[in-house]
Image: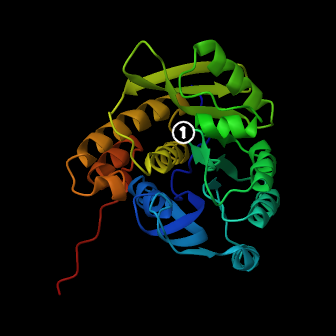
Amino acid sequence: MTKLFIPDEVQIPRIAAIHDLCGYGSCSLTTVIPVLAAAGLEAMPVPTSYLSTHTAFGSYTFFDTTENLPTYLGHWDQVGLQIDGAYTGFLGSLEQIDIILDFFRGRPEMLCIVDPVMGDKGTVYATYTEAMCQEMKKLVSTADLLTPNITEAAVLLDKEYRGQALSEQQTREICQRLLDLGCEHIILKGIERDDDNLIWNAVASSDGSYAETGHQRVAAAMHGTGDLFASIVTAGIFSGRDLHETVVFAGKLIHDAMSYSLTQKGWQARGVNFEPFLNYVSYFCGNQRGQIEAPELSQL
């Protein structure tokens, strides 16, 4: 079994959630915070930008928080906050990568999960410049766990994107080259095989271990599934669950959440509805802190 984090029996783990915040659209911090909370973990949000909607809309407002980030994170040091880990997602500027690197270096005890949110299906997001994509390699090198999709893996390795269909040999080679960048563990997401109706995720580690897990494919493309996957993985890891079993669980939950979302009006714009499934996150992550009897509600 591969456990990346052993939680304290009493103290709730604190995770810095470094991501953008969208007013509408199921993604980023509006996904990370409730998923970590359902797992019984404390999310400490670090907004990298504010958007009115996610970027799949034809237009959106975008506010960059780069100027404020050093002061924001520096204040945590001033007040002596202990932080057990960090999960990074969408970053809003080139400078933010260096700011987050400094944050990581100043807290070497943190377990760092990096989701290099740069693009999907062969397209790099409009806000990501070539310089940002290259600088992202530095952040990747510090990661305890890296969770790229195939597009992001191609960008990090300076390779041409050739589609989602990969053989096991190709997948193993990609994972090894990503590990060579300096990270300890890899989850390569969204692999397709021509001969089945499954989506595969590969899990590889610097110790040479490798495994794949598949789950049923949903016949729809839905915004926010990558953020949901990384959030569930983060929740499982910091709850002390095994890496491989966490990936299996994340795949199953995303399948069910996507299937449910197809019943909701406007799902094409909103993205994946995960909220009805948060109780599964609680059970999987062992959020049984109710061993301490809960106080009765106040009589208002």
Residue 299: % across, % down: 17, 84
Residue with the most extreme left position: 299
Q: How many marks?
A: 1
Which quadrant: the C terminus? bottom left
Residue at 26% over, 52% down: 276
Q: Which residue is disc 1 drawn over?
A: 121
Where residue 297 sits in the image (x, y, percent)?
A: 22, 76
**How is the model colour-coded?**
rainbow
Which of the two residues, 157 or 112, is positioned nearer the viewer here?
A: 157
Q: Quadrant of residue 97?
A: bottom right
Residue found at the very far bottom of the displayed protein: 300
* Position of residue 65 in the picture relative to residue 257 (left or right): right
Q: Is residue 3 visible?
A: no
Asked whether the viewer can see residue 80, the reply is yes
x then y, percent, for residue 293:
30, 61
Place of residue 280 in the rendered image (x, y in percent of width and height, measured from the top left)? 31, 44
Dot 1 falls on a residue whose secondary structure is loop
Q: Residues within 10 Å of mark 1 (few under 14, many from 20)?
A: some
Above or below: residue 258 compared with residue 179: below
Relative side of 263 to 174, left or right: left
x 56%, y 48%: residue: 7
The residue at the point 58 percent across, 15 percent down is 167
Residue 42 higher or lower than 215, as above or below:
below
Q: Is residue 155 left or right of residue 226?
A: right
Q: Amino acid at mark 1?
A: Lys
* Displayed quadrant of residue 289: bottom left
Q: State the quadrant of the N terminus.
A: top right
